[in-house]
Image: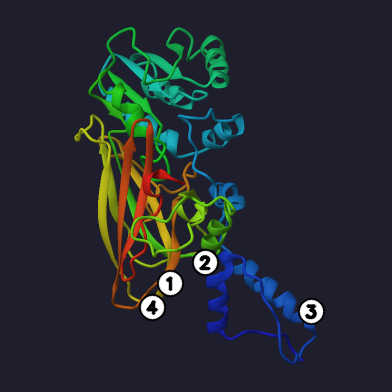
Amino acid sequence: AGFPVLPKAHQDLLASLAKLEPQLCLTGVPTHPRQSYVSYLRHLIASRAPVMDEAAIAERPYRDYLQAPLQPLADNLEANTYETFERDPVKYARYEEAVKKFLGERTSAVVVVAGAGRGPLVAAVLRAASDRCNVKVHAVEKNANAIVTLRHRASTEDAWRGRVEVHQSDMRRWAPPCPIDCVVSELLGSFGDNELSPECLEPVERWTSTSIPQNYESFLQPISCARLWFDARRANTGLPAGPPAVGACIGAPPPDRGLETPFVVKLHNFAPLSAVQPAFRFDHPASEKSLERYCALEFPVAVDCTVHGLAGYFESELYDGVMISINPATFSTGMFSWFPLFLPFSRPVFVAAGSSLEVRLWRRREGDRVWYEWAVVGPDVLPVHNPGGRS
C-alpha cells in the first residue's frame, strides 16, 4: 500500500544532481508497482530541476560539447554566429554603459568601431550618444558579407543615417580619415586574448589613447571532467601532433592533437578543484611592449582528485569600472557570448588532498603565429603541451 518515497537525505542528493540530467537505474525487489517508482523519480527530478532562463536555454545544446575556438581574424564569421552573439542581453548593454561613461559631458566625438560585424556595437554607441552628443562613427569590418548589412543599415536606419561611415578593411591596415577620440571593439575570446585582440589593437592604439575595453585578464582553474578529456583524446585521432616534446620519455608515442588543443566548451558536468587564479593581463593602451606572456601557478587541493585539465576564463574592464566577465567569481549574469576555454592534459594527473597542482602557461608569438604552451610540473611532471604551436 502507499507510494514509494525516498528519505529526505536521498531526495536532497538527487536534487543536487538534477541539473546534470542524470540517467537513473532501478534495481532490487519492488514492493510497489514498477511504474510508481518511475513516476515518483520523474516527479522528484522535475520538481527539483532549476528553472531555465533564456541564457540557459540557448546554452543547453552546447553543454560539455567541445568546439574549436573562433578565429575571426583568419576566417569570416557566418550569419548564424553573428545572430547568436547579437542576442546576448548583457554584453551590449554593458558596452552602451561604457560608451556613455566615456562620452560624459562631451557634445561631439569621433568613435571607431573596430570589427563592427553586423552593427550591434555601432548601435550601442549611437544609443549611448542619443541626442545629447553629436557622434560620428567609423565602422571598420573586413567581412564582405557583414559589410552588406552595415551599409544597408547606414542607408536605411534613421539613427545611423549621416552618422555612420562604413569601411571595408582589416583594422590593422586601415587609416582613419580624421582624429579619433575612442576605439570600441569586441575582439575578446573565451580566454581574453585567445582571439588575438592584443595583436589587432596593437596598430590601432596609435589612433587614440582611449580604448573600450581598457583591459582584460585571463584566469585558470584545475577541473575534473573525464568526459571532456576522453572527447579531447578522440578529437583529431590519427593526426599526431608531431614528435614528443623535449623531456619526454625516449620512444614515447607522439600525443594526439586533441590533447594539445585548446577547446571552447560550456562546462556543465565537471568539478572545480581549486579557486580561480589570474594568468595573463593586457591593457590598452599597452603597458608592455611584448605581447608574449608567462605565468607559474600553484593550486592547493583539499581532496584527493584526478585533474583532467584547466578551465580558462576572462574578465574585462570596458571603461571606468564597467565590467564583463565569465570568471565564475564575478560572472556577468545572463551573458552567453563566451564559454570557458578547456586546456586538456596529455594524461590525467592524480593530486592528493593537502598537496598542490603546479602548472606553467606560456603565450608565444612568432611572426603572424600566436599559440599557447602549457605544462604540469607537480606533483607529476608532464611534457610541455603544444610546443612550437605544433597542434
Residue neighbourhood size for the residue with mark 1, other residues' Cα within 10 Å, grouped as few (<14), some (14–19), many (≥20):
some
Mark found first going from the N terminus, 1 or 2:
2
Task: From the image, tell me which residue sits under label 4.
Answer: 304
Name the residue type under label 2: Ala
Q: Is tag 1's residue or tag 3's residue first in the polypeptide sequence? A: 3
Question: Residue 60 in the image: x percent, y percent?
Answer: 59, 52
CA gap, disc 2 and disc 4: 15 Å
Answer with mark 4 or mark 3, whichever residue precedes in sequence: 3
Residue 38 is labelled as none
Amino acid carrying mark 4 in the image: Asp
**Labels 3 & 2 near each other (Cβ < 8 A):** no
Q: How far apart are marks 1 and 3 (CA)?
A: 38 Å
Q: Is residue 253 above or below residue 161?
A: below
Res. 266 in view: no
Mark 1 falls on what kind of element? strand
Dot 4 alpha-carbon crowd within 10 angstroms: few under 14, some 14 to 19, many 20 or more: few
Q: Which quadrant of the view contains residue 284?
A: top left
User: Label 2, on which residue?
Assistant: 226
> Viewer-proximal residue, 272 or 325?
272
Q: Which mark is residue 306?
A: 1
**Identity of the residue drawn at 32% across and 42% down:** 364
Helix, strand or loop under label 2: helix
Q: Between residue 257 and residue 157, name the one nearer to us.
A: 257
Q: Where is residue 249 in the image (x, y as percent from the top left)?
A: 39, 65
Question: Which residue sits at x=57%, y=65%?
Answer: 20
Q: Where is residue 3 in the image (x, y as percent from the top left)?
A: 72, 85
